[in-house]
Amino acid sequence: ARYARAAALERLMVLHGIDHAAEADQLLESLLKSKAVAKLAHQRLLELRLAQGQYPEARKLLDAAPSQWSSDSDLVIQEFWMELLGGNTTAAVKVLDRALQMAQADGEENPGMLFVAALGQLLIRTGAWEETGRRFLATDHEYVPYIAMMLYARLAGGPQKNEALAVI
């Protein structure tokens, strides 16, 4: 119940600008010790820090995450947003490179990590964004239509207009 309240307060702040940050922060901090919701609380607290523009605090929170969470695509995408919104594009690209490497780990495609890499590369036009986007389209991830639209938008502006239509 405390996590649900904290999550609702965080969403109210992010989506509607209603400031319940202090209460949400306090609840989420207390839930970091709970084995049942620690990971979810950590992610919400990270979102809260990012929404408030508290990038150094967000970095501390990411660094404090247990090592077994390091391959979680939700945390990796939060790290990407933190670096990008904090103005550190070079670090954001490094996060995307790491996500792409993790997407290929163990010889199997990790759709969550591939999503992080595709989204980030398409947003900032770095790396092999078209290839990564197309690889992601071959997965069964729920955000395939979203990346398809982004890839279409990137391709439609260039000489590959007909090919862009085929993506959609």
Image (cartoon, rainbow, N blue to C red):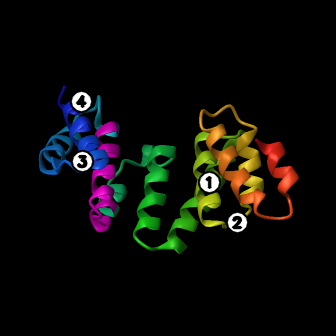
Residue drawn at the location 28% of the way across and 51% of the way down: 48
**Where is mark 2, residue-wise?**
127
In percent of width and height, residue 53 lies at: 30, 64
Q: In this view, does 109 lie to the left or right of 124?
A: right
Query: Which numbered marker is on residue 4?
Result: 4
In the rendered structure, are the residues bearing label 2 and label 1 in contact, judged by CB atoms less than 8 Å apart? Answer: yes
Q: Is residue 52 magenta?
A: yes
Which quadrant would residue 153 be assigned to in this image?
bottom right
Q: Counting residues from the N terminus, which is met first, the one under dot 3 or under dot 1?
A: 3
Residue drawn at the location 64% of the way across and 60% of the way down: 121
Which quadrant would residue 94 be assigned to in this image?
bottom right
Q: Counting residues from the N terminus, which is met first, the one under dot 1 or under dot 4?
A: 4
Residue drawn at the location 35% of the way across and 50% of the way down: 65
In percent of width and height, residue 61 lies at: 30, 56
Helix, strand, or loop for circle 4? Answer: helix
Between marks 3 and 1, how big is the CA–CA gap? 28 Å
Q: Counting residues from the N terminus, which is met first, the one under dot 2 or under dot 4?
A: 4
Q: Is residue 97 left or right of residue 151?
A: left
Mark 2 vs mark 3: give the one in front.
Answer: 3
Please rate how many residues cluster around mark 4, counting C-alpha atoms within 10 Å: few if below 14, some from 14 to 19, many from 20.
few
Q: Which amino acid does label 2 sit on?
A: Gly
**In what quadrant of the picture does the N terminus appear?**
top left
Q: What residue type is labelled 1?
A: Ala
Q: Is residue 89 above or below residue 26?
A: below
**Where is mark 3, residue-wise?**
13
Query: Which numbered marker is on residue 117?
Result: 1
Q: Does the magenta stretch include residue 3?
A: no
Mark 3 vs mark 1: give the one in front.
Answer: 3
Between marks 2 and 1, how big is the CA–CA gap? 9 Å
The range drawn in magenta is: 40-58
